[in-house]
Image (cartoon, grey):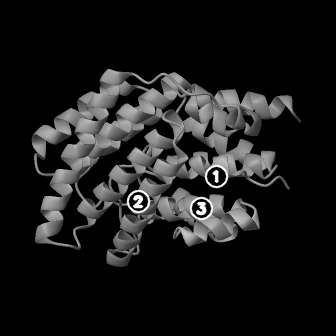
Amino acid sequence: MKRTTPDALAILLTLAILAGSAGAADVPAIGASGLDRGFRLMYNLDFDHAHQVFSAWQQDHPEDPLGPAGDAAGLLFSEFDRLGVLESQFDDKAFEARKKLSPDPALRERFNAALSLAESRARTRLAKDPKDRDALFAMTLSSGLQADYAAFIDKSNFSALHHTKDATSWADQLLAVDPQCYDAHLATGISRYIVGSMAAPVRWFLRLGGVSGDKKAGIEELQLTAERGHYLAPFARILLAIAYVRDKDNASARDLLSSLRQEFPNNSLFALEIARLDSIR
């Protein structure tokens, strides 16, 4: 089986692209019908309407950090779609040959502003209650989104690793508060999977930096999010499909992609990757 290269560390940073708030046992922690709709629009690549939903949510919930965090996630995912980032994750050669991208400076400014607002609101709530679940998730999401941008757009793995460690730390705190926040397992699961897939010398080096890995445990956490998560369940299925493709289990990957294509028919990524898998049978 092909070993994942150090550069493939960047894929673990995808953990926060489509995050919202961590739901307990498939039920949103807050009355999040607006956030639900926003993220479903995002999965279907309808970014303009998703932004409208997130903006309306912020107006109705001015102290909630998940409104601006969700908007930042939508902005980043739209940039990923424009630049073809996710497509490259299904193809090792495309990933290794990835070139420096040309980001939209206006979108990046909006992205950073949304993250700053989310973090400010989250820290205010954590100062009052260190166990505030939504605030902890907002901090997880903020660090993860910064890691995503550093890894996939700036191509700065060092900066991405720094933010990923922060995201994993926040996720661990969140799970300590509520072990049934299944969405949070995405942060720890994908990190364990990718680091656990690396060659032994690379794993040793990363352990020195405080990052450990266990490929099997990582897959189990992704499956937990895919089966019992709320906002992140579809994205966990995307990440599992990527993992299956990289492990040469194309049949399992195709099954996941087929279910995603049926659920989100306007997202061309799923049909594209199914066609690619069919072409190499």
- Closer to the camera, 234 or 198? 198
- Closer to the camera, 17 or 29? 17
- Report if residue 37 is visible in the image: no
Alpha carbon of mark 2 to alpha carbon of mark 3: how far? 19 Å
Element at label 1: helix
Q: Viewer-nearest of labels 2 and 1?
A: 2
Q: Position of residue 191 (x, y in %)?
A: 56, 60
Q: Which mark is residue 223?
A: 3
Q: Position of residue 249 (x, y in %)?
A: 80, 51
Task: Classify residue 59 by image quadrant.
Answer: top left
- Closer to the camera, 244 or 155? 155
Q: Which residue is mark 2?
A: 167
For marks 2 and 1 on the same chain, the one whose residue lies earlier in the sequence: 2
Q: Which mark is residue 240?
A: 1
Give the residue displayed 51% in from the left and 65% down from the top.
188
Element at label 2: helix
Q: Residue furthest right?
A: 281
Q: Are marks 3 and 1 in contact (CB under 8 Å)?
A: yes
Whether 137 is drawn above or below 254: the answer is: below
Amino acid found under the numbered disc labelled 2: Ala
